[in-house]
Amino acid sequence: MCGYVYLRKLASLCRYDIRFQFIMDGQTPSHMAFHRFIHDDLKIPIEEIFYDLNRYFEKNDTIDADILYIDGTKFEANANKMTFVWMKATKKFREKRWIRIMDRLQSLNRYCKKEELPYRFSILKEFSFEYLAEITDTLDRIMRSKHIEEQHGRGHAKHPLQRYKEGFVEDAEKILKYSIYYKLAKGRNSFSKTDPDATFMHMKYDYYNHTNVFKPGYNVQMGSSNGYIRHIYVSGDAYDLNTCIPFMEGYHRAYGCFPRKTPADAGYGSYDNYCYCKEHDIELYMKYNTMHKEQEKVTDKNRFKSCMMKPDEEGNIYCPQGHAFTLEQTKESVKGRYPRTIQFYHNEHCEGCPLRSQCTRSKHGRTLQRTDKLAEMQIEVRENLLTETGQVLMKQRSIQAEGIFGQIKQDQEYDRLWRRKETMVKLELLLVSIGHNLRKYHTHKMQKLKTNQKNHS
């Protein structure tokens, strides 16, 4: 009708647009009435409404729920421009601040010894806001006992104890701020002060003169079937790799089952994601990042890449010069969701090799890491995608998944979030998804009516 509209425009349409007047039966609610309805009444049941509507569409329209096309996109958060908080810089500033605190404590102890004050403060090795507050209170008591008045402004010399007190007050504020930053980051490398749940990500468009700098945003995963949005997942992850399993678990909680096929691009192909699909009887149609490189012909440029060095029928791996790799050790890795066995190979013939400068920069020679189970699953992925069914699915994934993003962002002019916090962002995206599905259902219904009329005529 008119794309995604904000609340004030929605209130205006109810007053002046005859279509909205018909729907609202002549009522003209204010923008705050819409806000209260969305924030208070829809916040909890919005997911149930979304999934109930999808079940209704599934019964009344042709939807193949066994196939779920997965793709992700990034939406810009409703945050100010200069609200960067980088945790790497925060860690550096925190360490420098602690060094200054230790120097100030040592200086204060020397001052107390010189002035024969009965105080000696401990030098701690860990951050403690409470300890700094205790030091500040102690200095305040000393100043009151000695009747030392605090001085401010030009022409008024400050007492050394006042300088120490002000320094520790500043230190305590900084340490508290850094502690809050670590809690807000929740393990991420960045966040925005305006919307702490948003993470700074690379996006295709930015308002910094198209310089491709970071912007605060959310990574939104959408699963679709026959053009209908079946499930969404909102996170602060900058990449799609870690979002697949939470996305599928949310889908299972909503519908009580898993899809049979989940075509997706190379951003989702990983050992944990493949194992999860195997565990729940989901056929492997997720590409992996080196799939297209492996299908290329061996040339002088790509023959030194690890993906081009495959075991032969006897299980031996050879370098471009023809020297065999030696299996050095095998380790069990438990870093991910599923444990895996990693094999470490080393080539002992790199010394004096004429191709060494092109093959490796390591002083100890070329090394390789390999996981047999992952290699087997990657072979299964290639075989599935090379079939006629796999080619059709990947072609439809590009049409349906990317088409939905194009309709929402370009056609409906919804390319930036209006609400803040992850829960409110998810509510907003669920409303947008419901609108998209209703338009899809109405379009299909009208097409069926036209087809029936033509057949009867």
Image (spheres, rainbow, N blue to C red):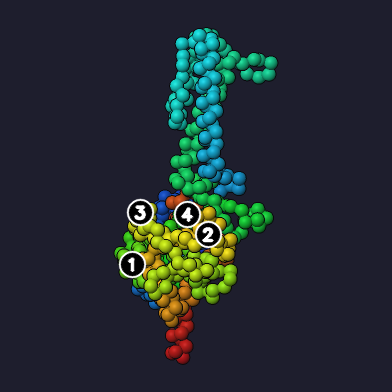
Disc 1 crowd rating (10 Å Cα; few below 14, some 14-19, many 20+) is few
Q: CA distance from mark 3 to mark 2?
A: 34 Å
Q: Which residue is mark 2?
A: 351
Q: Secondary structure at mark 4?
A: loop
Residue 222 in the image: x percent, y percent? 45, 64
- Residue 69 found in image quarter: bottom left
Residue at position x 39%, y 74% in the image: 313
Q: Secondary structure at mark 3?
A: loop
Is 414 rendered above or below residue 88? below
Residue mark closest to the camera, 4 vs 3: 3
Which residue occupies the foreground of this view, 112 or 408?
A: 112
Contact? badges 1 and 3 (CB < 8 Å): no
Q: CA distance from mark 4 to mark 3?
A: 21 Å
Q: Which is nearer the N-term, disc 1 or disc 2?
A: 1
- Residue 374 visible? The answer is yes
Residue 60 in the image: x percent, y percent? 37, 75
Tell me which amino acid carries mark 3. Val
Q: Secondary structure at mark 1?
A: helix
Which residue occupies the foreground of this view, 187 or 456?
A: 187
Residue at position x 53%, y 9% in the image: 115
Q: Which residue is mark 1?
A: 278
Q: Which residue is mark 3?
A: 334
